[in-house]
Image (cartoon, rainbow, N blue to C red):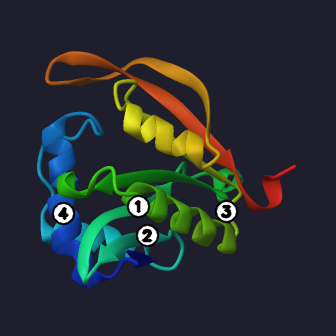
Amino acid sequence: MKARPAELRDAATIAEIYNQGIDDRVATFETEHRTTSSVEGQLGALAGRYPAVVVEDEHRVLGFAWTSEYRPRSAYAGVAEVSIYVARDARGRGVGRLSLGALITEAERRGFWKLVSRIFPENVASRRLCAALGFREIGVYRRHGKLDGRWMDCVIVERLIGAAVE
């Protein structure tokens, strides 16, 4: 397995993997599937500033991780939000660790100083992955949103990188 920068040619597979995450109801508030063209648009919007990586094995994309804008204020220019998704049949094989590790390295290279994410408390695998790669849980957003009519909390995680590391 290897991590590499995500490219437009990966959009269909990224959409498929993301849609599995939507269907599983443990990783996102989104309920409508992504299309290849919507992922192409997101990859295009990220290009240059916000890193995105895929992990592939024998030319098959097994998972991805990307960053996005945290807030539009200039004070937060070095903070990025992180998302990680792994294909169902590739979970438990180190794909998430490889993709997040590569993303952290690239975000630091691009001058980011903090990575943040929000994780459903029930998503134990994501919480363990983030903890293993140096993220710390800093709090919980209570009743942050509704998914299928049910209130969901979100665990807030962060990792300092680059210039912010003490």
**Front one among 142 and 128:** 128
Q: For numbered disc 2, what is the local secondary structure? A: strand
Lateral position of residue 28 relative to residue 82, left or right:
left
Cα distance in 3D space between marks 2 and 4:
14 Å
Task: Name the image quarter holding the N terminus.
Answer: bottom left
Q: Which residue is at a point 22% across and 55% down the rendered structure image?
A: 18
Which residue carries the number 1 mark?
Answer: 65
Report x, y in % for residue 59. 25, 83
Report x, y in % for residue 54. 36, 71
Q: Residues within 10 Å of mark 2 (few under 14, many from 20)?
A: many
Q: For numbered disc 1, what is the local secondary structure? A: strand
**Front one among 103 and 74:** 103
Check residue 112 in the rendering and tell me which mark sits there, or answer none: 3
- Residue 118 in view: no
Three-letter amino acid code at the position of disc 4: Ala
Q: Are marks 2 and 1 in contact (CB under 8 Å)?
A: yes
Which residue carries the number 4 mark?
Answer: 15
Give whichever of discs 2 and 4 has the lower sequence position. Answer: 4
Three-letter amino acid code at the position of disc 2: Ala
Q: Residues within 10 Å of mark 4 (few under 14, many from 20)?
A: some
Give whichever of discs 1 and 3 has the lower sequence position. Answer: 1
Check residue 52 in the rendering and tell me which mark sits there, or answer none: 2
Q: Are marks 2 and 4 in contact (CB under 8 Å)?
A: no
Cα distance in 3D space between marks 1 and 3:
16 Å
Report x, y in % for residue 100. 49, 59
Q: Residues within 10 Å of mark 1 (few under 14, many from 20)?
A: many
Cα distance in 3D space between marks 3 and 2:
14 Å
Q: Residue furthest right?
A: 166
